Amino acid sequence: MEYSIDWATEVWTSLRWIAIASAISLLGLLVVGFFIARMTRWGRQFWRVNGEFFIGKDTRVVAWAFVIALLVFSIFGVRMSILFSYWGNDLFTALQNVGSGLTGEGAAGRQLIDAGKSGFWHSMWVFGIIATIHVVRTLVELYIGAAFEIRWRRWLTSYATADWMRGNAFYRNRFVDLGDDSKDSGIQPGIDNPDQRIESDITNVAQSSRLLLFSSGGSSTNGVIPALVTIVSFSQILWNLSGPMTIWGVEIPRMMVWLVFMYVLIATVIAFWIGHPLIRLNFWRERLTANFRYALVRVRDGAENVAFYRGERVEHDGLMTRFSAVIANYWQIVFRNLKFVGWNFSITQLSVVFPYLVQAPRFFEGRISLGDMTQTADAFGNVHDALSFFRNSYDDFADLRASIIRLDGLEDADQKSRTLPVIATTDRDRAVRLTDVDINTPNGAELIRDLSLSLDPGDALVVKGRSGSGKTTLLRGLAGLWPFVDGEFARPAGDRTLFLSQIPYIPLGDLRTAVAYPALPDDVGDDAIRAVLERVFLPHLVDRLAEEEDWSKVLSPGEQQRVAFARVLLTRPDVVFMDEATSAVDEGLEYSLYTLIRAELPDTILVSVSHRSTTDQHHTEVLELTGGGSWDLRPVGG
């Protein structure tokens, strides 16, 4: 029996084929990738978010090593599919010989039977070898793919988080206008739900990009690169096996090849038209589900206040309103997917019989063997599936593009937030100087105009004024958070200047981490933490330093404000700005805490925002904000 290929030399033939195909594919990947990153909007967005991973000096070697390895194993998988098609040809040809021999007579019949049996068992041995290789190849490819995703996701998470934190972008990007007048203006990236963007969208980008570009699960038709290589490779096989077909009196040679290309091309154009709205719908799915989840988290975080107000009905109505939007979007996706999947499924089912219908006349005439018939169907199926990959994967690409848009929107907002105005700040040892400081609202209304003052070691300033006069906004402007500010601000550098908000931030972790913040617990030491807890009247917490709790829920507002005073004693700054730092404690405790600070840190410059008149006695000057940009600076009691 004559085999379809020379299996004895196939090892070296396949290795040479894989090497050549990999080199061509890598070159094509670089060229096409370059043009996509330059010429398409989504390509530019993808490269903006991920480019540094592939060109950064700390990651590029490992990144491209993974890319090349995945590319080679993907093409290796295509080669295995080709070998399986030739194996199938030999197997069915052997069975056909046995069948012909059983109906024959004499020596010729026995010769056919012997040749068929020999070919059958040879095919079984070949199958055992190539199947084993294919299983091992698939497992190695899955491992490399998972390792690549993990490295990519780890880098992208670190990059996006660092960019979000740099320059107070996590706060200031709320002031960024991301208006988009393009044709996709209905998709406004904004900066909603950065937590979901950093967690969910990064995972989707790393995973979907790998799966869409390279093969997955051992398939030779799932993935852009293996699909293209499959199209070229199996088209050649199909070309050799297909014959002419006469249509309306015109003989068309190699009709099978032209048939599969025309069929899939028409189906793909229609599928893209049906599936295009999925990009927008998937974008809104991420936004609406994140908004609903955020609303649930707000109820959890504000559970005590909701319970006090008995606001369950209002919260339930609000949650269900947000959830209704999620469901409405989901139904839109369902209906669109029904059209998209229904079209694709119908096209796939109709394609099953085509190769048999076209080749059947040649088989009945004895011009091709049963093995050729089955290999034709296999080659047709591979070419069809590879061409259909681009159609079937459109919803996955739409989901990926939505994630890219969201990550690019976050990075865009972060970068723009760092270009917003910030007060001109200079370093000055143990002194505070404000020169011609202006504070405005976002709509341009003046809160403070031309504020100038000087504070030296030991000075204490209390800022007062009616609600909405700009007291807290002044602190935000001096801290570099508020962008609607102008003027000059001189203060001690770095952590020698400390800002305390009205509700102290309590990080996750054990109690020592919460008290030492923003310093590290090891930089402070447990003995120092215990000592300051005693001094700020929290002796019941000294033995709980190692306990991990959600301390923002465990500690009362008054206890949290005392933790803030403990941080002042631990860091011992040259200047401390406090916003309503004693609003949650009684006047007696307030007196004790301020007295403690003035006794422990007599040279520290103290600036307090307060509504209480009882805080005046702990300060040397009063800054009264009188509205409309005007202000009054006077000694306490003056």
Image (cartoon, rainbow, N blue to C red):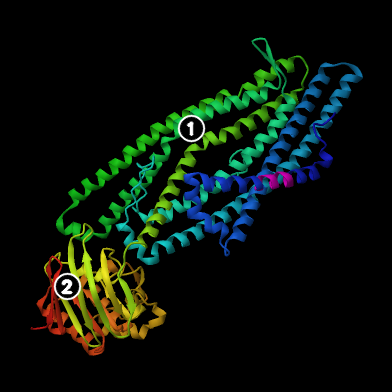
| Residue 82 placement, left or right of 611 | right
**Of labels 2 and 1, the one closer to you:** 1
Q: Which residue is mark 1?
A: 272
Query: In the depicted view, which residue is nearer to us: 419 or 158?
Result: 419
Q: Residue at x 63, y 30 (%)?
A: 381
Q: Residue at x 74, y 23 (%)?
A: 370
Q: Amino acid at mark 1?
A: Phe
Tell whether position 454 is magenta: no
Q: Which residue is mark 2?
A: 583
All told, the count of numbered labels is: 2
Residue sitting farthest toward the left: 638
What percent of the width, then of the height, locates residue 225?
A: 62, 42
Quadrant, the N terminus: top right
Tell whether position 19 is magenta: yes
Q: Is residue 562 above or below residue 84?
A: below
What percent of the width, then of the height, locates residue 8?
A: 84, 40
Query: In the depicted view, which residue is nearer to us: 388 or 142?
Result: 388
Quadrant, the C terminus: bottom left
Q: Amino acid at mark 2?
A: Ser
Distance between the Cα atoms at labels 2 and 1?
60 Å
Magenta span of residues? 18-26
How packed is label 2: few (under 14 Cα within 10 Å), some, or many (20 or more)? some
Q: Is residue 558 above or below residue 19?
A: below
Q: Main secondary structure of the magenta part?
A: helix
How packed is label 1: few (under 14 Cα within 10 Å), some, or many (20 or more)? some
| Residue 85 placement, left or right of 150 | right
Which element type, helix, strand or loop, lies under badge 2? Answer: loop
Which element type, helix, strand or loop, lies under badge 1? Answer: helix
Query: In the depicted view, which residue is nearer to us: 327 or 518?
Result: 518
Q: Is residue 254 above or below residue 191?
A: above
Residue 565 in sight in this render: no
